[in-house]
Image (spheres, rainbow, N blue to C red):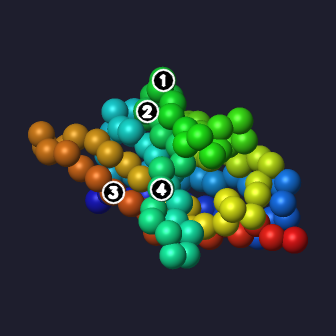
Amino acid sequence: QVQLVESGGGLVQPGGSLRLSCAASGFTFINSWMSWYRQAPGSERELVAGITGGGGSLDYADSVKGRFTISVDNAKNTAFLQMNDLKPEDTAVYFCNAVFMMDYRHKNYWGQGTQVTVSS
């Protein structure tokens, strides 16, 4: 059974930092593409950052480049999103996403989401 469990969200002041975690199970993590998306109220879900399970390829939205860092720990099958210099516009529910092949089929799974609120 595939599971993605996010943690690490919360309330932080502008300029602060948070680290999100996504613990994955039920698939071969190193062969997957792991991403973080976010969705603010009234807005569409948008890609924040992506990385291969092996940590070899990275991608970031322009709005977070230089402030956010995505990484993985293969031994723990966990993806992370380090968020620094947070701004009020970063407030959203953050979702972990995993894309991989299983039984010759393309699979796409989402975590339950974790709330990040940036406010003074």
Which residue is at 32% across, 45% downward?
A: 99
Query: Quadrant of the image for the C terminus?
Result: bottom right
The reply to whether discs 3 and 2 touch (Cβ–Cβ < 8 Å) is: no
The residue carrying mark 4 is 46
**Three-letter amino acid code at the position of disc 3:** Tyr
In three-dimensional space, the C-alpha distance between marks 4 and 3, rounded to whole angstroms, equals 15 Å
Q: Position of residue 114 (x, y in %)?
A: 58, 67
Q: Position of residue 43 (x, y in %)?
A: 50, 69
Q: Residues within 10 Å of mark 2 (few under 14, many from 20)?
A: many
The residue carrying mark 2 is 52
In three-dimensional space, the C-alpha distance between marks 1 and 2, rounded to whole angstroms, equals 6 Å
Q: Nearer the viewer, residue 116 or 104?
A: 116
The residue carrying mark 3 is 109
Which tag, 2 or 4, sits closer to the chain's start? 4
Residue 1 relative to residue 81: left or right: left
**Three-letter amino acid code at the position of disc 4:** Glu
The reply to whether discs 4 and 1 touch (Cβ–Cβ < 8 Å) is: no
In three-dimensional space, the C-alpha distance between marks 2 and 4, rounded to whole angstroms, equals 18 Å
- Mark 1 residue element: loop
Q: Residues within 10 Å of mark 4 (few under 14, many from 20)?
A: some
